[in-house]
Amino acid sequence: EVQLVESGGGLVKPGGSLRLSCAASGFTIINAWMSWVRQAPGKGLEWVGRIKSKTDGGTTDYAAPVKGRFTISRDDSKNTLYLQMNSLKTEDTAVYYCTTLRMTSFSDYWGQGTLVTVSS
Amino acid sequence: DVVMTQSPLSLPVTLGQPASISCRSSQSLVHSDGNTYLNWFQQRPGQSPRRLIYKVSNRDSGVPDRFSGSGSGTDFTLKIGRVEAEDVGVYYCMQGTHWPPVTFGPGTKVDIK
């Protein structure tokens, strides 16, 4: 069974930092482009950013609201994706999902999400 | 960035009756490779999103055949043939043709009358 399990969420003060992890099991992420998608309480889905596979360059792209503050990385040897979040703002409060976010016939996977609350 | 809109935003339906959700993009979603990267997702209450449809009309494995997707260019539709209780949730369209960034529609909440 394929699982993506996010961890690392919690309560943090504005201006603080947090690092989320996404551990994959049942499939290997090494060839997958991986994304983070967030959902503010009671709101819709918002793409945060993605990282390509190392064979495709391993480059990253980010949504405008998080660019320069968030960094996505991957450790294929640990089958794990990361999201480093710095200079957090109250508007970053959301459930953060790790996902393959695929556009083609390959199966698409999502984690259960981890809640990040930014509040003083 | 491509803006995705959906209508209606709220859709009360009667069990066993059909339902239809419209999704429009601010520019054509036809990619230079000839494909149209438009996905539909279902998010049941308290659950993570789940992809139902990819590339406009292709159902994911395990998705009931009462779900169908259609459309082209900038106009797309998700249809539920006969709504069942388990279909309650929020449905999102998403474009992956012009990314970054990926953009989602605002969501359509489907519930039972």
Image (tube, helix red, strand yellow):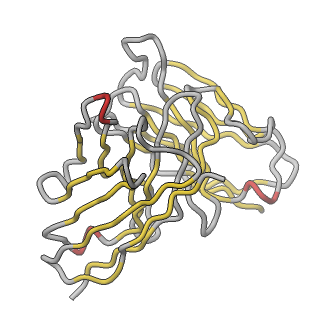
Q: In the current view of this chain or complex, which residue is farthest to the right?
A: B16
Q: Quadrant of the C terminus of chain B?
A: bottom right
Q: In the current view of this chain or complex, which residue is farthest to the front?
A: A77
Q: Quadrant of the N terminus of chain B?
A: top left
Residue B61 relative to residue B96: left or right: right
Q: Is residue B110 above or below residue A86?
A: above
Q: How many marks?
A: 0
Q: Nearer the viewer, residue B106 or A46?
A: A46
- Name which residue lies at 27% across and 68% down: A19
Q: Is residue A113 above or below residue B2?
A: below
Residue B87 in percent (x, y) is at 74, 54
Residue A102 in percent (x, y) is at 49, 36
Q: Nearer the viewer, residue A25 or A37?
A: A25
Residue A88 relative to residue B9: left or right: left
Residue B75 relative to residue A96: left or right: right
Q: Nearer the viewer, residue A75 or B32?
A: A75
Query: Residue B98's image quarter?
Result: top left
Q: Nearer the viewer, residue A78 or A20?
A: A78
Residue A77 in percent (x, y) is at 37, 50
Q: Is residue B10 above or below residue A57?
A: below
Query: Residue B77's image quarter?
Result: top right
- Name which residue lies at 57% across and 57% down: A3
- Name which residue lies at 55% across and 26% down: B55
Q: Is residue A57 above or below residue B20?
A: above
Residue A38 in percent (x, y) is at 39, 59
- Name which residue lies at 74% across and 38% down: B67
